[in-house]
Image (cartoon, helix red, strand yellow):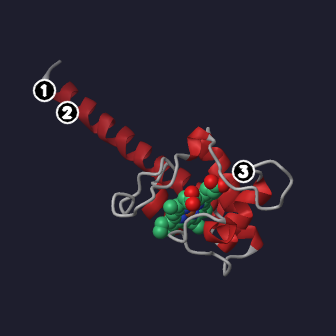
Amino acid sequence: MNQRNTSAWWSATRLLLMLGAILLAAAAAHSEDSSAKTSDGQALFEQHCSSCHGMQGHGDGIVSDQVLLRPRDFALDAFKFDTDADWVRGTDADLANVIRNSPSVYGGSPLMPPWAHLSNDDIEALVAYIRQLQG
Ligand code: HEC
């Protein structure tokens, strides 16, 4: 390639990169819009729960080393509490109760605070997000 072709090639490449960046930014803005409509389980989880449970729910949040009982990895599906006495642990209703009232109410650890101030929609979104993290 001679000098002129090379610089033309670079301009074209730069233009394409810029277009790509604009498209990515637009896509990101769009996905934020669509999740803002309802409770955003991922945002709620990252804000309120990830310090203990870890960003991916593996029980490895930044404070988990300092607490006596580490939260279990959600992916192991090893839920402990049957909060509504239906003989099944870890149903959606159980998870919602544990989140709303704290595990301590069901004989578990008081380390996890109750989240009774969250709306039912928020708690449902959190349960749905935990199911997603279970993979
Ligand atoms: C201060 C640390 C901490 C925070 C913050 C926290 N948790 Fe926990 N969580 C725990 C611990 C510790 C356990 C294990 C409790 C036990 O086994 O007694 C637990 C257990 C759980 C369980 C498992 C229940 C079961 O049946 O085994 C779920 C689900 C859960 N947390 C969801 C959440 C959600 C959702 C949030 C955010 C709204 C949250 N946690 C915030 C520490 C925390």
Q: In the rendered structure, are the residues bearing label 1 and label 2 in contact, judged by CB atoms less than 8 Å apart? A: yes
Task: Check disc 1 and report the residue beneath it.
Answer: 3
Residue 112 percent coordinates (x, y): 54, 69
Question: Which residue does the numbered mark 2 point to in the structure image?
Answer: 7
Where residue 39 sits: x, y (%)?
69, 66
Between residues 17 and 62, which one lies in front from this camera angle?
62
Please say if 121 is above or below 127. below
SS state under label 3: loop
Residue at disc 3, CB closer than 8 Å to ligand 1: yes
* Amino acid type, residue under disc 2 in the picture: Ser
| Residue 73 appears left or right of 16 | right
User: For residue 9, what is the image quadrant?
Assistant: top left
Neighbor class of circle 1 (other Cα within 10 Å; few <14, some 14-19, many 20+) is: few
Residue 84 at least partly seen:
yes
- Return the x and y of residue 89 as percentages of the image width and height: 74, 49
Tell me what residue is drawn at x 37 percent, y 46 percent: 18
